[in-house]
Amino acid sequence: MERPRHQGMAKNTYMRWRLPLVCLLWEVAMIVLFGVFVRFSPEADAHWEAEKQEMNLTSDIENDFYFRYPSFQDVHVMIFVGFGFLMTFLKRYGFGAVGFNFLLAAFGIQWALLMQGWFHSFKNGKILIGVENLINADFCVGSVCIAFGAILGKTSPIQLLVMTLFQVTLFSVNEYILLNLLHVKDAGGSMTIHTFGAYFGLTVTRILYRPNLEQSKDKQGSVYHSDLFAMIGTLYLWMYWPSFNSAISDHGDAQHRSAINTYCSLAACVLTTMAFSSMLQKKGKLDMVHIQNATLAGGVAVGTSAEMMLTPYGSLIVGSISGIVSTVGYVYFTPFLESRLHIQDTCGIHNLHAMPGLIGGIVGAITAAAATEDVYGKEGFIKAFDFTGVYQTRTPSIQGGFQAAGIVVSLLMAFAGGAIVGGILKLPIWGDAAAENCFEDGVYWEVPEDEESDAYHMHNPDKPASP
Amino acid sequence: MERPRHQGMAKNTYMRWRLPLVCLLWEVAMIVLFGVFVRFSPEADAHWEAEKQEMNLTSDIENDFYFRYPSFQDVHVMIFVGFGFLMTFLKRYGFGAVGFNFLLAAFGIQWALLMQGWFHSFKNGKILIGVENLINADFCVGSVCIAFGAILGKTSPIQLLVMTLFQVTLFSVNEYILLNLLHVKDAGGSMTIHTFGAYFGLTVTRILYRPNLEQSKDKQGSVYHSDLFAMIGTLYLWMYWPSFNSAISDHGDAQHRSAINTYCSLAACVLTTMAFSSMLQKKGKLDMVHIQNATLAGGVAVGTSAEMMLTPYGSLIVGSISGIVSTVGYVYFTPFLESRLHIQDTCGIHNLHAMPGLIGGIVGAITAAAATEDVYGKEGFIKAFDFTGVYQTRTPSIQGGFQAAGIVVSLLMAFAGGAIVGGILKLPIWGDAAAENCFEDGVYWEVPEDEESDAYHMHNPDKPASP
Amino acid sequence: MERPRHQGMAKNTYMRWRLPLVCLLWEVAMIVLFGVFVRFSPEADAHWEAEKQEMNLTSDIENDFYFRYPSFQDVHVMIFVGFGFLMTFLKRYGFGAVGFNFLLAAFGIQWALLMQGWFHSFKNGKILIGVENLINADFCVGSVCIAFGAILGKTSPIQLLVMTLFQVTLFSVNEYILLNLLHVKDAGGSMTIHTFGAYFGLTVTRILYRPNLEQSKDKQGSVYHSDLFAMIGTLYLWMYWPSFNSAISDHGDAQHRSAINTYCSLAACVLTTMAFSSMLQKKGKLDMVHIQNATLAGGVAVGTSAEMMLTPYGSLIVGSISGIVSTVGYVYFTPFLESRLHIQDTCGIHNLHAMPGLIGGIVGAITAAAATEDVYGKEGFIKAFDFTGVYQTRTPSIQGGFQAAGIVVSLLMAFAGGAIVGGILKLPIWGDAAAENCFEDGVYWEVPEDEESDAYHMHNPDKPASP
């Protein structure tokens, strides 16, 4: 088992000093920065008892914790189990999928708490964190998990950590531009998370193009059980997506509406995905790759508009379209991107996040532009779009224009950032594997004795092991 | 691998045009109907801001979203991961179990939102949906997932969609008769979901009886890992059942009590299941089929009474009995049903849902009949049974009678509906597989290269593949 | 397949009468005791409608159910899926891991409701249970799941039930001493759950020392897919640990703060675990055992202090250290404990629960001793440590001393209790397997036809099965 793996491994994938060094240095840096900057928000601080009286709150239930914590936990599951297991479909890369996703997300959320904190929760020299910061950190890392999908199986853990460091930084800058400077709405992150994350990842994988990747082609597929493991990821993403899109929406009707729209969009998306998966295949059989991925496009595509008055039928329309686009993408675009544009997209994030993310941004811009006081009510209209303060005079159509600008900014940040970060990751010091060792856990993981041959020995003790 | 599958496949299982057609037509119909009928409930509508003032609510936390959303997500997990993975125990039908469950549930919830909406949330020509509607749609589809368990592995996806269409319709009618006409309590659905769903499914599978099913007998069992996948389903159903039974109970004590009763019943059920699983087997070994299924009977059996003052010890008794009944059912009734009554019940839903559902209905009737103002308190008594308006004069014993009538109605609806729908599904146009191809994913799914033989090649590249 | 399993099985592992007897007797006892003692707490009782008015509550949302139920469900998942699947890493003990964990936890929570109820919720001769009791029962059983980790694969289900009976009892006594007599804070259970549970389990496994355990050495490892199943357990424990540590904290800021501290500690722990896992291995490859276990040490180590003003950077420090200690433990201490002290610790609970539990107790004592009115605010200070009534005059440093005493008491209870219970379990009447049959599901479970050989037959029907 060892021989074919090492044979021809020209590259140095030895992690023993490099990986620990990066992890430990990083953690020390986090401790120092958290020590200097991070404190509890008033609602998580022991002073809350006094604070409550000042704010005239009669009950602890008014603490933001109770509005957001259940959604936070759902989002948390999506990032760690959802993305982690979604990527276990490869037959020999399950450890890397779940384990590296775990590593980069745990690494990234700490940095995201700082970066997003400086931009959004900075008061008197301190970052004050509460449950909403935890959700936002998970969101930010979600965009890294998406990019990871494009380069899955082809990078070393150090490359992933370096990418996480830069991507979280760029994400936070882009998010700041969109939410604060453009005053754009994007609670479920069609633009900030999906469009940015996916095009960033696609640019990185383009730059890291491996011409000889077909050498590991036999490992790029799935096996029966790895497809079932991946379905765990799919279903948790699918089920909890209503929580994702509503997690940081305004309390009350906005959270409620956001969950309903997302639920509807996702339901519709499953049907069109199944339809096109069967239709686009000669034998008419369903393809697990589509079911695992394209069924989720409906959640991405209402990420911006779910908290708006998209309405349930609007959600069905958006979900239906995104399921079709995504499935068609898997069948036609992914091979095209690889052969013509040299974009090797392991998980097909172009179909699951990039295109549906763009749809989501556009639908959000249209829904915002179409908003009227009639539909939202006078107070609801102002609250939904935060048309207060300097934005008091913004009209829906202007808001729609800014939403559209948000898409463009996200794309530019993704391409530019991805190009730079891809360039950094191309340096020959990060320990990535040779082409023939891609998609193979044995490079970075202690892999247990083989299941099959082992079972063979166990159950046929009196027979020789070799055929 | 292809040969044995196609050999003798007399039936036409080609889905390429039929499945997409059904899915797409359906989704278009949904979009049109949602467009005409479905709008947000006041608590999910942007007008809520104004509404709140009218209703004199001081806080957004009073939005029903915060009372029910965490339970909704748990129910959502039960429907998609719980039922989906519970059925992955078959060695070669994991894709079908998870994937078709996904398809039919996503299809069904849209139709359920409409059907249940017309009956229960119809105002001024519009269906107004909020989080409670989402839960009820999931519940409704739960009854379809149950019926799916009986015909698992023997039907085409189109048959499943046709069945879902009709079953959701009948479910909604039955539910309307029980809840509105008979004024019956059934928050956890012992009658509406389990009794109806299970006897419906059993009737359907009876009508679809396949005399030659033993031709695929080698695929009806489990393998080691498929049993572990199924345990994921089991545990999520078991853990979240308290949420299921309490999800639509009245705010406050009723939700609280419902969760406690269900928790107790399920705990007791595990012990009696283990006891009888060991006792009924000559070698005294535990059988995974029982652990995967009968441990859940306790949740079914308190579905009606959990929100009543069943009390914790009452729950233990009900849970204990249902675990025994269910396990005994797997050992003795299932073979009997198959050999004598020609009811081929793949997952044994008769043991997990039908009998415990009946127990649940009966326990509910008794608990209702035994209710006193002393036990419930004056206000609690009226609130628990909604003895207001025209029902002001109903006594507990009369309520008990109506509860019992609810069981009978559910059974009749299940038998009649199942017979008709079974007849429709028997038409030779739906693309079901031949007997020897049942329980085999390869019929409707692209199945990846085989795990074992593949691993074999990979790790012994220099050895021939054939022994 | 049968032969090697039974060959040499000198011990009588026949469960047919013993296991059912224990389960059924136990369940009858539970029903009787629940009937005599257990009733609903006011918030779960139908009298709540009247109660609300007396307590001047304006809304049902003030019911404790809404403060704690989402956390309860997360804890529930940790106990049943988290611990259950974490232990599926063994190649041939997945049924036992998940199934026996299910059995002992369902058995234990009923007894815990009674034991903890007598100590903490006893009023006028009745135990009044609400959602907080359900959480505490899950917590108590958590300590048994931990101890199970040490003896995994080496004990019969009856031994597990006997151990559960005694351990739940001792847990409740120890918890009473700590919380009520010493007035110690330990919301996440570093001392009561982890330190006690782990040292109890280690003492038991020491007493049950099996000198010939290397006879089943070939079954003590993992296979590829069993490691992925175990990661499901790991991730659910990791993701939901913030709910675990905050589940029974005071409403409001304490729950909020507890979740944040735990989130931070766990994130840091992942990085140091990865660093040391790579560093301590010659080839620098990551070891799944470490990733599955040591990444969780951060949750254990803030179990006592998470609800205190540990601060986010304090949490990062504690998490970082515990990840290192735990990983080092797996590499150096576990082999040492086995070879020198004859402590055979299947899952390495010494590294995951015992040492981090001690760290957690110490950090809690220090954090309490360092508390000031300045940091907590006047009201917050009193509320955080319950310095009311007879404890009005307690100072932080005295509290710190009592916290430290809590560690010592937990250790003593664990050693003494473990020794006694270990002695009882050593009696030759409980049906444990011989050394060569340890870590083998076939002893107590009906195991399905083998996956590999079966697949072999199915896909190569025309080839002989023997090589």
Image: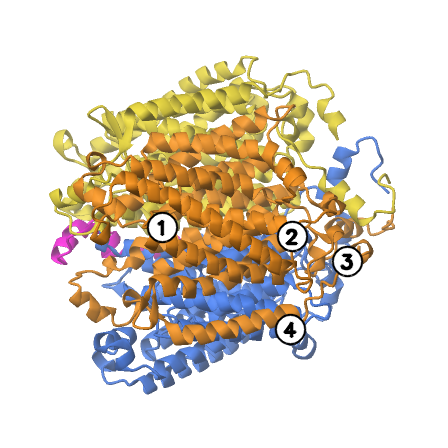
Chain colours: A orange, B yellow, C blue
What secondary structure is found at the residue carrying circle 2?
loop
Give how far apart the Cα atoms at labels 3 and 2 are.
58 Å
Question: In this orientation, does residue C105 appear?
Answer: no
Chain name for mark 1: A
The residue under label 4 is C334
- Marker disc for residue A247: 1
In the figure, C449 relative to C72: above or below?
above
Q: Split into 4 quadrants, where in the image is the C terminus of chain B?
A: top right
Query: Which secondary structure class fits the magenta region best?
Result: helix
The residue under label 3 is C8
Chain name for mark 4: C
The residue under label 2 is A208
Give how far apart the Cα atoms at labels 1 and 4 are.
42 Å
Give how far apart the Cα atoms at labels 4 and 3 are.
29 Å
Instruction: Look at discs 2 and 1 and give the one toward the viewer.
Output: 2
Labels 2, 1: one chain: yes
* Amino acid type shown at disc 1: Ala
Q: Quadrant of residue C399?
A: bottom left
Callout 2–callout 4 Cβ contact below 8 Å: no
Residue drawn 40% across and 43% down? A303
Q: Is residue A334 magenta?
A: no
Please give left or right for residue B72 compared with residue A9 in the image.
left
Q: Position of residue A141 (x, y in %)?
A: 48, 56
For label 2, count other residues whose C-alpha is less than 10 Å away and answer few (under 14), some (14-19) or many (20+): many
Identify which residue, B37 or A120, lies in the foreground: A120
What secondary structure is found at the residue carrying circle 3?
loop
In the figure, B272 relative to A49: above or below?
above
Instruction: Look at discs 2 and 4 and give the one toward the viewer.
Output: 2
Residue drawn 22% across and 32% down? B399
Magenta residues?
A: C31-60
What secondary structure is found at the residue carrying circle 1?
loop
